[in-house]
Image: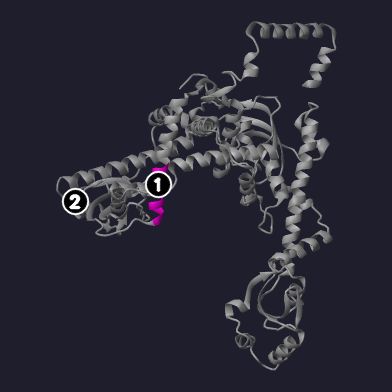
Amino acid sequence: MLTGLRSAFEKGFARFVLIALMGILVLSFAVWGIGDIFRGGTQTTVASVGGTQISVQTFQTAYNREVQNLGRMIGRGITPDQARQFGIDQRVINQLVTEATLDERGRQLGLGIDDDTIRNRIVTTPAFRGPTGQFDRNAFQEALRQSGFTEQTYVDAERRVALRQQIAGAVSDKMTSPQILIDAMTRYQNEARQAQFVVVGAREAGDVPAPDAATLQSYFDANKQLFRAPEYRKLVVVTLSPQDQLGFMQVPEAQIAEEVARLREAAERRTIQQLTFPSVEEAEAAAKRVAEGLAFEDLAKERGVSETDLTLGSLARNNIADPAVRDAAFALAEGAVSAPVRGRFGIVLLRASKVEPFNAAQAAEQARMTIATTMARNAVNDLHDRIEKERSSGLPLADIAAKVGVPVTTVDAVDQQGRDPQEVQLNLPGASDFLAPAFRAEVGLENEPVNNRETGLWAWFEVSSVTPARDRALDEVRAQVEARWREDEVKVRIGKAADQLATAIRAGKPLAEVAQPLGLEVRTTPVLKRSSTDGTWGSAAVQMLFVTGKGQAGTVTAADGIDRLVFVPTEIVLPADATLDTRTRDQLSQSIEDDVLGQYIARLQRDFGSTVNRTLLNRAVGGTTETR
């Protein structure tokens, strides 16, 4: 595209047209002004709290991250409409406004976090630990690269997070729950019920004849949206991931040996016992007695050394600072006692009371995989940089892939859930990451790559064409419509049969009496609490049991979503003396802390003034520009 513009600009008439267009653009800046570009006005600020502004870019970055995370959780792409149905846009903007509120409060109070605290937070972050369990700068740098941070921007972000946590902790941390609330929750959590019930299923629905043409057409017309053909897009996709590159990595044996030696330092462990002597002669005499049969523990008792002081512990090589002691200890077989060792702090006898063997073959395979994974990530990073460099030339993605030497995938038609027109789920690596932005992209335009920070996958895509969503004709989906109608009809009939039974029970007939003509088995539930489920009784059914009075009839959908349960509660047992479990007690305290913090933040927002540009927010997530 850029090459085309340059070529057009060099030709006579086109040159004058472009100059005229640029003149109009410059004039528009003169008329309307360009201050908002530099001031971050309403067109770039999606929300503000006091003097703290949230840019569209900040919102979109957080929004896209949440959409991608949800897509990975459910294994498919998320459409903009689905994202709004899940409330992702509102959740993200609420989170950003909350953070901005705490940032504004921190500035108002003049709070800050010292460098040592930030450094300690970083070095103790589990994601930045290497194979030894300690902070690893290479792991840190790789995590930053995958997250799109520089070291300074990450430190700044971590400082803001720490400051927010400091304010939030001062307001709501360690709040306790009132005893009256704990008692009420105890009763609620531990109340138990039993019921008699019957299951009304497809048998009670009877034979369902095929619908006539008018019935099927009427059902289709009323539910046409269920059978619409979705929008399909033709995509050109290039993906890179460390997993794909692993097979190409040749790990030098020297590096494996070096890594195995490092693993040995941390992984090979021995339980070491030690006795100290004033002279070599005395140590040699003691060693001779042990060789003649004296137990090492008995020798320790003779010398007034307790069992606790005798044993140094289960130690790895890198836990022992004295080289002479370390080498002697790790040369011993299990149960063997060393010759006198001249250590840094005296003459000692050592005994390896327990040896945890080091699996060299397993360590070598682990080392090979660790090194290969690092090499694969580096290879992905190099290929990523080469692709990005070539993209600046304006070449199509397929040509760039061929030039760089990476595979390219052309998907002729895919919907937003990753299915083809035959509704077959396609196996597209990275689909949960790139499908959502691909369905927001324009045909033929260049798009930013997407990155999965957890797997290290990068994906580039181009939209070649779009087949719009459309209503299907009945003849296209007749089989699906008839199957759906039959499912719904069975559910309706089951519901009517269940309601008739419940009505008869409410009129005074016992459950067994109304069930007998239909040949239904009367069953009894186990003792159920509100948190219980039991095969046929799903969570929704159990909740209905707890809002139905003893001896009253109720109906509810069974756990399979098709059958209906007709039930009568027979036993209600209130707890005489029960305690609230630790998990629920902690959740209750956390809920109170969250409520208090929420009220505090809401008050700050009223004091500072908080605004959200709904028009810009909706536009940023691909919705309408109308405010909601």
On whether residue 77 falls in the magenta region, the answer is: no
Give coordinates of residue 360: x percent, y percent.
Answer: 74, 69
Vertical position of residue 552 compared to residue 38: above or below? below
Is residue 423 something that shows in the picture? Answer: no
Is residue 106 something that shows in the picture? Answer: yes
On whether residue 585 falls in the magenta region, the answer is: yes
Tag 1, which secondary structure? loop
Q: Residue at x 24, y 55 (%)?
A: 574
Identify which amino acid the numbered label 1 is placed on.
Answer: Met
* In front of the other: 364 or 350: 350
Judge from the rendering whether residue 212 lies leftward or rightward of residue 390; answer left or right: left
Q: Residue at x 33, y 39 (%)?
A: 492
In the drawing, what numbered circle is on residue 334?
A: none
Give coordinates of residue 559: x percent, y percent.
Answer: 38, 49
According to the picture, the residue beneath numbered tag 1 turns out to be 175
In the drawing, what numbered circle is on residue 551?
A: 2
Residue found at the far left of this picture: 508
Q: Residue at x 77, y 46 (%)?
A: 378
Give coordinates of residue 304: x percent, y percent.
Answer: 60, 84
Which label's residue is closer to the chain start, 1 or 2?
1
Dominant SS type (magenta): helix
Vertical position of residue 208 compared to residue 268: above or below? above
Q: Quadrant of the C terminus?
A: top left
